[in-house]
Amino acid sequence: MKLTTMTTTALLMLAAPALAAGSHAGGHDEMMAAGKPGEASDVDRTVAMTMSETDDGRMIFEPAGLEVRQGETIGFTITNAGEIDHEFVVDSHEKNMEHKVLMEKFPEMEHDDPNAIRLSEGGSGEIIWTFAVAGTFEFACLIPGHYESGMKGDIVVASK
Ligand SMILES: [Cu+2]
């Protein structure tokens, strides 16, 4: 089976059918923990996000965190300024931890999810996200070892 084009939802169902009972793999505009995919015409603010490794062995996102207003649509422009692959995933901390365990089982897993992008050296891409839910969420790189090396940051969504 080819795992590389499966969505995280599909992989989670494959890996843990009991957990998936009663749920369904939805479409790409479905509400997720941290909000939902946005449209280019709805972007309120753009945020340039850079991923890289540091000389002292850490891996980082810049900026290291983000504050948004509930309902705000952010156009993330993501650049991999490092020398190895990185990814940018927006989700709840809990979902990221589930996903991280999965990545440790399937290290070459690539995402076909609207809240995630994987970029190789020098690559760039965009994620448009509407933060419909107030609370504290997280962006992270879930490639094995990267989260522990520093690739995580809080997104604090202030209620309206
Ligand atoms: Cu990374």
Image (spheres, rainbow, N blue to C red):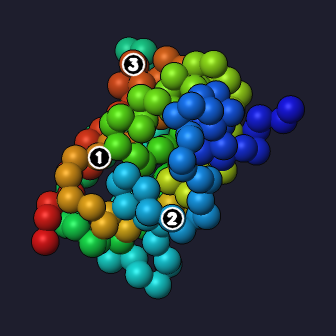
Comparing 18 with 9, the one in front is: 18
Image-based side of 24 in relation to 40, left or right: right
User: Residue 30 in the image: x percent, y percent?
Assistant: 51, 64
| Mark before the other along the chain sequence, 2 or 1 | 2
Spatial separation of the CA atoms under disc 3 and disc 2: 29 Å
Position of residue 51 relative to residue 44, above or below, is above
Residue visible at 42% across and 15% down in the picture? 57
Looking at the image, can residue 119 be seen?
no
Q: Is residue 127 left or right of residue 159?
A: right
Who's the residue at 54% across and 68% down the image? 29
Q: Secondary structure at mark 3?
A: loop
Instruction: Compare residues 35 and 43 and report the one nearer the observer.
Output: 35
Residue 68 picture quarter:
bottom left
**Front one among 120 and 32:** 32
Q: Which residue is mark 2?
A: 30
Q: Residues within 10 Å of mark 2 (few under 14, many from 20)?
A: few
What's the residue at 14%, 64% (across, down)? 159
From the viewer's perspective, tell me whether residue 33 is left or right of residue 126. left
**Which amino acid type is shown beneath numbered disc 2?**
Glu
Q: Give the residue displayed 40% in from the left and 19% down from the top.
A: 149
Q: Is residue 84 left or right of residue 2?
A: left
**Residue type pointed to by label 1:** Phe
**Which image quarter holds the N terminus?**
top right
CA–CA distance in space, label 2 to label 1 = 17 Å
Number of residues whose C-alpha sits closer than 10 Å to that of mark 3, classed few (under 14), some (14–19) or many (20 or more) = few
Local secondary structure at mark 1: strand
Q: Which of labels 2 and 1 is toward the front?
A: 2
Element under disc 2 = loop
- For disc 1, the marked residue is 137
Name the spot of residue 136 as percent of width and height, x first: 22, 47
Q: Position of residue 116 (x, y in %)?
A: 54, 49
Residue receiving disc 3: 148
